[in-house]
Image (cartoon, helix red, strand yellow):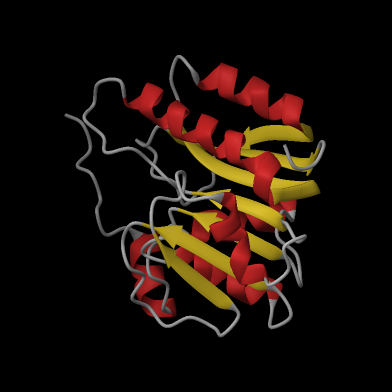
Amino acid sequence: MPRPRQLHDRYFKQAKAEGYAARSAYKLIEINESRRLIRRNDRVLDLGCAPGSWLQVAQEVVGEHGRVVGVDLQEVRIPLRPWVTTIAGDALTLPPETLLAPLGDPASRFDVVLSDMAPSTSGHGDDFLSARLCERVLDLCPRVLRPGGTLLMKILEGEPTPDVIARTKRMFAKAGTTKPKASRDVSREIFIWGAFAVGGRA
């Protein structure tokens, strides 16, 4: 018999104990500890940020001289630091100018783009829907990410995944994939990272 799914595993319990909005905080913490994609004083864009656990991690990494902007259709209800701004809306259809506005300088770009977005899963074609989200994140990067910046985005493994990884490798000097320990064993999710974005604004 298959093992029953553990909804309340140790990461869930740890998140509750440590005040994170979701267990996904530990995915970003682990990846960032190994890849250092987010650094002190960075300007970070978090696409699909609700319920806010990645915002919580990013705000502590960048510190008070950094900036974190989160975008989601859902309202983020948790308390956040003064250097965090949230925007209600579709992260992938809002104009780049709206995403960049909280930086306060029309010439500024983000140092880091994050995306923990996932499609509404049905069990059929989820990998294609996930890949489409990632492709749209990659479309957005040249408009909002500075040359030399970094990217981290979630994708559900499947047939189109190699194409998304290949495109990421063309856009970044270094790129790869990782699956943090905080991801459930049964999950198809992996995370694509890219460092040292090539080129500037499209």
Which of the 4 quarters of the picture holds residue 199? top right
Q: Is residue 96 left or right of residue 176?
A: left
Residue 153, position as x, y percentages in the image:
55, 42
User: Which residue is rendered at x = 54% and y = 83% of the image?
Assistant: 81
User: Which residue is rendered at x = 38% and y = 61% of the image?
Assistant: 50
Which of the 4 quarters of the picture holds residue 59? bottom right
185 to 79, vertically: above or below: above
Residue 61, position as x, y percentages in the image:
67, 71
Residue 39, position as x, y percentages in the image:
75, 64
Q: Is residue 58 left or right of residue 170?
A: left
Q: Is residue 102 left or right of residue 43?
A: left
Viewer can see residue 38: yes
User: Which residue is rendered at x = 38% and y = 24% of the image?
Assistant: 127
Which of the 4 quarters of the picture holds residue 137? top right
Residue 135, position as x, y percentages in the image:
53, 30
Q: Nearer the viewer, residue 108 or 55?
A: 108
